Amino acid sequence: MFNKILIANRGEIACRVIKTARKMGIPTVAIYSDADKQALHVKMADEAVHIGPPPANQSYIVIDKVMDAIRQTGAQAVHPGYGFLSENSKFAEALAAEGVAFVGPPVGAIESMGDKITSKKIAQEAKVSTVPGYMGLIEDAEDAVKISNEVGYPVMIKASAGGGGKGMRIAWNDQEAREGFESSKNEAANSFGDDRIFIEKFVTQPRHIEIQVLCDTHGNGIYLGERECSIQRRNQKVVEEAPSPFLDEATRKAMGEQAVALAKAVGYASAGTVEFIVDGDKNFYFLEMNTRLQVEHPVTELITGVDLVEQMIRVAAGEPLSITQDDVTLTGWAIENRLYAEDPYRGFLPSIGRLTTYRPPAEVAAGPLLVNDKWQGDAPSGEAAVRNDTGVYEGGEISMYYDPMIAKLCTWAPTREAAIEAMRVALDSFEVEGIGHNLPFLSAVMDHPIFIAGDMTTAFIEEQYPDGFEGVELGEGDLRRVAAAASAMHRVAEIRRTRVSGRMDNHERRVGTDWVVSVQGTDYNVHIDADHDGSTVTFSDGPKMRVASDWTPGDQLAKLDVDGSPLVLKVGKISGGFRMRTRGADLKVHVRSQRQAELAKLMPEKLPPDTSKLLLCPMPGLIVKINVEVGDEIQDGQALCSVEAMKMENILRAEKKGVVAKINAGPGDSLAVDEVIMEFE
């Protein structure tokens, strides 16, 4: 076994590899850029080597710099994680030349399957069903338009060396094909150092289901079930689960066997993923093979009990697989939600800054017994596991230079229904402040009837949130639960306030018992009867709810029991009440006396400032291109400029007709959120 492993990556995946290496007793080396000097993966590793400036193309994907770090530390093996150099055959060749093991597949497999164009040709030659498209290289934007018309809109424009949603665009017409080609090419060059692009037919209403394979250098290969990855935004996976709620055993077996056969055909050795599009009739079509560890690998680990990182390390050390296909069993259900530093209320635009609060839910190891990488027996009914793979910490910075992922929150339970419920509670318990994040959106997805039914396709987000995410409106039942909780919490806060002020009479409180709780435009008149075990909240129209909690004023997280069911609230103080967030809803909850409630209705509403004649930078980022000049007449939907942030290029478009009056920024300028890019007459 290796005496030292260098992780050629950063963030949560570097931390993930370090955990397994530590479990195996193998020392680790981290590499870091200027922006990551205080990063968690640097703190966790046994050694760390600085490799350059923040941009990835000046540090993490510069092969010579990584090789220098290997020589400095004497690492015997390198784990590339995902992204960056993980599917770069030149990097694998450089390692081989130095006698350093690559914790990944052979160079030949990377070249044949890591390149999307080549992998499709091989799949076609092997008579694997593939999506129609143009596998040749595309010269320029006009060539892209011509090919798109030949393939037939809609088309998917993809980076040959891409992954993780980078360098991918869907085009429905010539203009989008032209713009998509340029943006995909730029993103591919910046993220992978390879700007080759290809085009394929975009299959509408598909499900994205992938098979995890594991092969060794002794000719053994197995598949470890599938992952459902259909909930995506801009081709970036957001929610994954294993197994898929759609597949039957026969389809799973057919897909798995085909995936393993494809891997063996190219001499694959390591963990890899074969991705398929599956239609409503369970017909499946090969998309690509990712010759690396996938972001969503934890859900496979949770249902199989196999540590994929450990298996990768053992295969790289020349060991044969210790498990066969017959040993693989799928136990229970696992769900992964990707927590991103992006603001769902601003079209999911990236957000950067300091994590003033970062408190994930406690990790819980539950479920069947894990012995020698295999589950033994069934999980006790009702148990659930919580896992959080992360690369950040409270007080740390989210940088504009890298992927906006903060964490991967996973839950496991014996059934899909129980795993979803465990995820709901875990999301509500996750405290993040200081940056925009997508926790509210993830909570909304977990409660969406289409997701609950398991009937989603890759068009889920586009179809269910066509105008973007505008928050969650709670139903009547949930509103009453929140109102009951708020009134009980208000009573506790009033007791604390009176004790601090000294206004007490024989140690008995003289706070009111009748309140008006205003939430989401609804007023509830409630009466509170309190005892040592909690409070009984009676609504004026009859219903009663029992509330119990150990919440104390100042706590930012309240875990309550309302009528026997858990309710988790993120809590902040506002004048006359609380800001409460739960199940994707962001609520201002006011608890007032009857007279205060009457007066509140007379207060004028504060209107937001008019910014309709300004183009504001929606995120901290770098201006890549300005498409218009002062005096130009612009049309609704016209591209105005491009802003790059967190490895993604975003095109800002006009929301209505107008004339450009002033341009305040140009290419190369770094702007903060809400800085004015241009003004209109």
Image: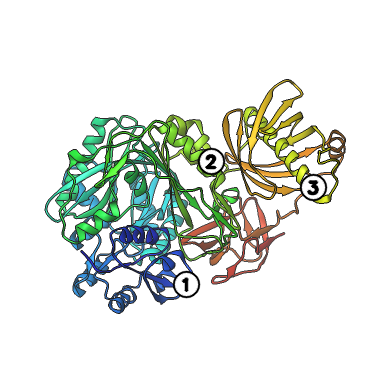
Instruction: Looking at the picture, tell me which residue is in the foreground, 257 or 509.
Output: 509
Instruction: Looking at the picture, tell me which residue is in the foreground, 617 or 419.
Output: 419
Tell whether 576 sits left or right of 369: right
Q: Residues within 10 Å of mark 3 (few under 14, many from 20)?
A: few
Indicate the quadrant containing the C terminus: top left, top right, bottom left or bottom right: bottom right
Tag 1 and tag 3, C-beta contact below 8 Å: no
Q: Position of residue 641 (x, y in %)?
A: 56, 61
Indicate how the structure is coloured in the image: rainbow
The quadrant where residue 105 appears = bottom left
In the rendered structure, find residue 443 and report the number of the disc placed on it: 2
Foreground tag (3 vs 2): 3
> What is the C-alpha distance between the residues marked 3 and 2?
37 Å
User: In the structure shown, which secondary structural element does the residue marked by tag 2 occupy?
Assistant: helix
Residue found at the very far left of the displayed protein: 218
* Residue ID at (24%, 47%): 372
* Residue ID at (35%, 67%): 193
The answer to whether residue 172 shows anywhere in this view is no
Foreground tag (2 vs 1): 1
Pointer 1: what residue? 37
Q: Is residue 307 above or below residue 548?
A: below
User: In the structure shown, which secondary structural element does the residue marked by tag 1 occupy?
Assistant: loop
Pointer 3: what residue? 499
The answer to whether residue 303 shows anywhere in this view is yes
Q: Earlier in the sequence, mark 1 or mark 3?
A: 1
Q: Is residue 315 above or below residue 516?
A: below
Amino acid type indicated by mark 3: Arg
Indicate the quadrant containing the N terminus: top left, top right, bottom left or bottom right: bottom left
The quadrant where residue 472 appears = top right
Tell whether 421 sits left or right of 129: right
Amino acid type indicated by mark 2: Ser
